[in-house]
Image (cartoon, rainbow, N blue to C red):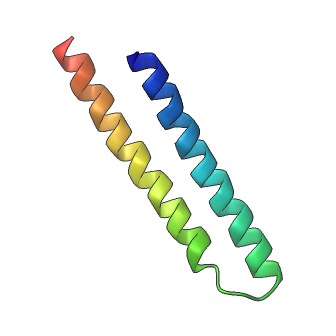
Amino acid sequence: MLLILLLLYGLAIVGLFLGGIITIIVKSSNNESTKVGVKMLIASVVMVVIGGGACAVILANA
């Protein structure tokens, strides 16, 4: 069960990161604001940090 949740969490992070990169590329080529793409990238980095901390806690208690 934990492995499935970890896999889904990882897929969410990858989706946010790729979506943010694509959004930044498309909006910058159209001379629009890239604020949404940058927010998506920041959210994916925060999720990586939180996920890494959670994994460390789980492994420390195992």
Location of residue 26 in the rendering, given as x and y in whole percent from the top left corner? 79, 72
On the rendered structure, is 37 left or right of 32? left
On the rendered structure, is 52 left or right of 13? left
Q: Residue furthest right?
A: 29
At a point 82% along the width and 80% down the height, the residue shown is 29
At a point 36% along the width and 35% down the height, the residue shown is 52
Say which quarter of the image contains residue 34.
Answer: bottom right
Location of residue 39 in the rendering, given as x and y in whole percent from the top left corner? 51, 69
Q: Is residue 39 above or below residue 16?
A: below
On the rendered structure, is 31 left or right of 55? right
Q: Could you tell me which quadrant the N terminus lies in?
A: top left
Location of residue 62 in the rendering, given as x and y in whole percent from the top left corner? 21, 10
Location of residue 2 in the rendering, given as x and y in whole percent from the top left corner? 38, 19
At a point 53% along the width and 45% down the height, the residue shown is 13
Q: Residue furthest top?
A: 62
Q: Nearer the viewer, residue 45 or 9?
A: 9
Q: Is residue 43 above or below residue 58?
A: below
Say which quarter of the image contains residue 24.
Answer: bottom right
Q: Residue furthest left?
A: 61
